[in-house]
Image (cartoon, grey):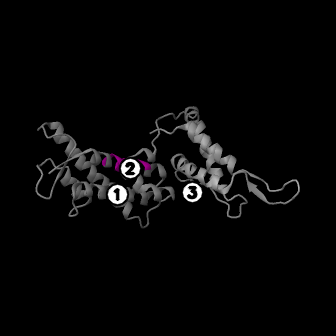
Amino acid sequence: MAIDVDWARAEIAKFLTLTTMRSASTRTFITSRMLTFGSDDEIVASAQAVEQILDRVLPTWRTSVPSEENAANRWYQHREAAQRADVALQRDAEIRERLGDDAPQLSASTMHPWAWEGARALWQSGHFRQAVTAAARKVNAETQNKLGRRDASETALFVNAFSKDAPKPGQPRLRLMPDDGSDTFKSVHRGAASFAEGCFAGIRNPNSHEDGLSELPEHEALEQLAAISVLARWVDSATVER
């Protein structure tokens, strides 16, 4: 689902106002102490929504936006990230058009929940290779749950599940369309099995043996996560034939 830009920018504006610093001095009391305009309770409540907006607009903000340990404002990192996110929300389409790159953009948060929820925590901390591996593991586990199987996993599980053969005791099948004997049925399920094998052999396995491997660039990890998401969506939408 697309972001409600007006709502998101309003939430960011509210948060920035609440976290703006002001003097604690009064007419009768002079001090160098600074306070935020909003109370702690108001800011925490606002941050609950703003953090989710930041996770969507700037997924790596917790690591990519610098924090100041000794900053007078404890919300320093949140404020800078919020300001960046506001610009991104306001000017993203314009910037892509002006730079000659107005092609559709892919967002991890719009992928299948099995893929993104599996990857989210590691992704947001900048561990992209591990995040993709975690997403693959999540899809594998959800497929085992759907089929009620623990005796097979990963490539063996998916190749068996998408087999064109009739189901056997303890070996249910995933059907993306009814078996009408057509070439389309055979092609769809052969392709799903091959695609799943490629995801685990070509993406999950190399990423899980990451000793000596450099971190994946975010855009490459996003492409790999998208492949895992496609597989997750197929499994989720398939019917189980026993």
The residue furthest right is 28
Q: Residue 99: where, in percent of width, then height?
A: 57, 35
Residue position marked by numbered label 3 in the rendering: 62
The tag earlier along the polypeptide, 3 or 1, is 3
Residue position marked by numbered label 1 in the rendering: 138
Compared with 190, 170 (above or below) is: below
Which is closer to the viewer, label 2 or label 3? 2
The circle drawn on residue 128 is none
Check disc 3 and give the amino acid type.
Answer: Arg
Magenta extent: 222-231
Of residues 29 and 154, the one nearer the viewer is: 29
Q: Quadrant of the N terminus?
A: top left
The circle drawn on residue 113 is 2
Corner quadrant of residue 65? bottom right
Residue at image point 83% right, 56% down: 25
For mark 2, give the secondary structure: helix
Q: Residue 8: where, in percent of width, then height?
A: 57, 41
